[in-house]
Image (cartoon, helix red, strand yellow):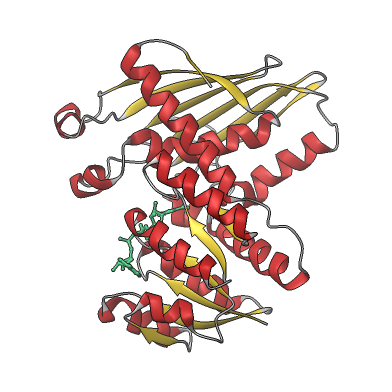
Amino acid sequence: MIGIAVLGAGRIGKIHAANVAANPRARLIAVADPFAEACEPLAAKHGAEAMTDPMAAIARDDVDAVVIGTPTDTHIGLLTRAVELGKAVLCEKPIDLDLGKSTEAAAQIEKLGAKVMLAFNRRFDPTFAEVRRAIDAGKIGAVRQVVISSRDPGMPPEGYVKSSGGLFRDMTIHDLDMARWLLGEEPVTVTAMASRIVDAEMVGKYDDYDSAMVILQTASGRQAHINNCREAVYGYDQRIEVLGETGMLSHDNLRPSTMRLATAEMTEAQPPLLNFFLERYTAAYRAEMEAFVSALADGTPLPTTAQDGVQALRLAEAALQSVRTGKTVSL
Ligand SMILES: NC(=O)c1ccc[n+]([C@@H]2O[C@H](COP(=O)([O-])OP(=O)(O)OC[C@H]3O[C@@H](n4cnc5c(N)ncnc54)[C@H](O)[C@@H]3O)[C@@H](O)[C@H]2O)c1
């Protein structure tokens, strides 16, 4: 049994706590959040201890691993402490908004041989994992192009935009990781365009964008295209397509039901898309926790690393630089 403390009892902390509690090889020891009103009900729900001091939760002898689901600017402090104490970590993305600090943290993790997994949940989504398995099984031959459409159902609140680190570090980072994972090669050039066409006034205040297109290319010429928009009126749009030498793999959006409606006015009408990430990626978060716990229990390598976090952040920074300069950025 792996003893786990979940740090942060907000949106993502609630998901992680439930998945730890439901995992047969893990025990949820504590939920820590400086706000008692946040951690107490969550801890009580899963029979764990509520703690308002996250550092004390990390230091507990019965805690083998911690899940960091706190605001991004607190990740590095908690991560550093946990690895110093020899604890394994599942850390939410991004490691930090600053590439230099993230690189330093990853170097320290490597030096200590610490077990740190970056929470790129989409890799664990059953539908996307199926695409990756099909690539690995040679179903489409060598990969040539990857297309990722990733659009949010609506603009986040202003407070979120203000502290998010911007569209590329906050939202595109997931797609950049997916692109690396599906391409199977590291991108060496990044070309990006971004604009403010959903809420120009609000995102403009923070020098941010609400719509972007990013093109990546690897040294051998493999390409990926990511399109992001903060608002798609029809819901949370998450699709991927991978073109290979001998075929194409794609995954469409998921819906709560496969029912279709045909009337005099329309045919093939379907229920709305699963809205938003907590609903769309429920299975992915569960599988992500399963992968973390299994790797620790079996002593096998963790499926994602801090270096994956650094690499995705590096691509996000390059995309931003490309937007600002109007030029392709070479890495
Ligand atoms: N992988 C994903 O799909 C995904 C989705 C959402 C959020 N995230 C990431 O998860 C992190 C948290 O996001 P959220 O939306 O859950 O935020 P949130 O604001 O809903 O929750 C954060 C919680 O952390 C608590 N907190 C603040 N400082 C803390 C500390 N030092 N120790 C312990 N708890 C502390 C807050 O009181 C709050 O309850 C962010 O880094 C975000 O980028 C990832």
Residue lying furthest top: 327
Residue 36, quarter of the rendered image: bottom left
Q: Quadrant of residue 228?
A: top left
* Number of numbered markers: 0
Depth check, front residue: 87 or 161: 87
Q: Is residue 120 visible?
A: no
Work out whether 205 lies above or below 70. above
Q: Where does residue 97 sit, x and y in percent of width and height?
A: 36, 44
Quarter of the rendered structure image containing ligand 1:
bottom left
Between 189 and 269, the one nearer to me in the picture: 189
For this view, does 147 lie left or right of residue 138? left
**Residue in the picture at 43% in, 21% down:** 213
Extreme residue toward the right, this view: 138
Instruction: Look at the image and tell me in which quarter the N terminus lies.
Output: bottom right
Question: How far from the left and from the top, in percent, is residue 40?
Answer: 33, 84
User: x%, y% of residue 117?
Assistant: 59, 57
- Residue shown at 83%/20% (left/top)? 246
Residue pushed farthest front?
Answer: 111
Please, is residue 182 above or below residue 319 in the view? below
Residue 95 appears in the figure: yes
**Is 60 placed above or below 321 here?**
below
The image position of residue 274, as x and y in percent, is 47, 49
Q: Residue at x 38, y 85 (%)?
A: 50
For the point 62% across and 33% down, which residue is it? 180
